[in-house]
Image (cartoon, helix red, strand yellow):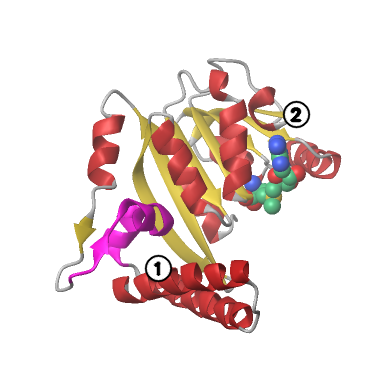
Amino acid sequence: KLSARLQHIADRLSPGCRLADIGSDHALLPVYAVQNGRASFAVAGEVNDGPLEAAKRQVAEAGESKRVSVRKGDGLAVVEPGEVDAITIAGMGGALIASILEAGKDKLAGVKRLVLQPNVGEDIVRSWLIANGWYLSEEIILEEDGKIYEILTAETGPDAAKLNDQLYSERTISGSTVSLTKDLLLLMGPHLTDSKDEVWFAKWRSEIDKLDKIRQSVATSKQESSREKEESLNQLSNRLKEVL
Ligand code: SAM
């Protein structure tokens, strides 16, 4: 049985897709996907030997060596152009996910859907998507074992720029005068901001607490650069409080 996090990622694949799961570790997701009709074929990519061996074992034990190809390599280097139409990258930082997509741009022609689960730095992923002709078709947030995860589903098409303009257009929250500017929407997620999920509120309340703690520790320093940092942390914290 998959964790709730991986299950949500699997649920976002179009049935029968050709999948590349990059940074697959135990290859749990691709094995589940081919065994449950989510994918007809999958590549499990891994750059590190330990997880690569775990993936190979898992695929062999599941008897799925024909439908799941375990390959060693950095990011999208493990797939041929046109080989897959869906890519999942989960359980790493947003900066790493964006750099994997950036370095593998030539492999994205023909890819219809990206399902991405950054552990941190979601805004970096959102910015990369906008800059590269992808739009968010869905965002979900969930809590499992005391951790909060965001899953971003992105699609591409001729209307991507127009859809992004709508998604990130500055807006006010009903009953409030607070303006949600593009930088806040990149940080907090345009769909998540609109849906105001309870887990989303919990995440941002805890982020505000973290910011306030950092701000207090910075405030005791007399350095000019620290004062600037405190001021920017203060601003962000206050803006987030207004949104919530
Ligand atoms: N995707 C799985 C999940 O969400 O449960 C595993 C996540 S695990 C925390 C991250 C995996 O990404 C590790 O196994 C690591 O070896 C792999 N990884 C990190 N950088 C990578 C890269 N550039 N290319 C391929 N795999 C990478």
Rendered image: mark on residue 103: none
Dividing the image into four equal quarters, which quarter contains ligand 1? top right
Callout 2: CB less than 8 Å from ligand 1: yes
Which residue is pictured at 56% across the width and 73% down the height? Answer: 227
Q: Is residue 156 magenta?
A: no
Answer yes or no: is residue 57 visible. Answer: yes
Which residue is pictured at 65% across the width and 79% down the height? Answer: 221
Answer yes or no: is residue 35 visible. Answer: no
Question: Relative to 17, is 205 above or below?
Answer: below
Q: In the depicted view, which residue is nearer to us: 237 or 98? A: 237
Q: Would you say the magenta stretch is mainly helix, strand or loop?
A: helix
The answer for how far apart the CA atoms under marks 2 and 1 are is: 35 Å
| Lateral position of residue 195 relative to residue 74, left or right | left
Figure quadrant of the C terminus? bottom left
Which residue is pictured at 63% across the width and 43% down the height? Answer: 96
Rendered image: mark on residue 73: 2
Callout 1 secondary element: helix
| Lateral position of residue 35 relative to residue 27, left or right | left
Amino acid beneath label 1: Trp
Callout 1: CB less than 8 Å from ligand 1: no
Q: Which residue is mark 1?
A: 200
| Lateral position of residue 123 relative to residue 45, left or right | left
Give the crowd class for mark 2: few <14, some 14-19, many >=20 residues within 10 Å.
Answer: some
- Region of the chain picked out in magenta, as a range: 177-196
Amino acid beneath label 2: Gly
Callout 2 secondary element: loop
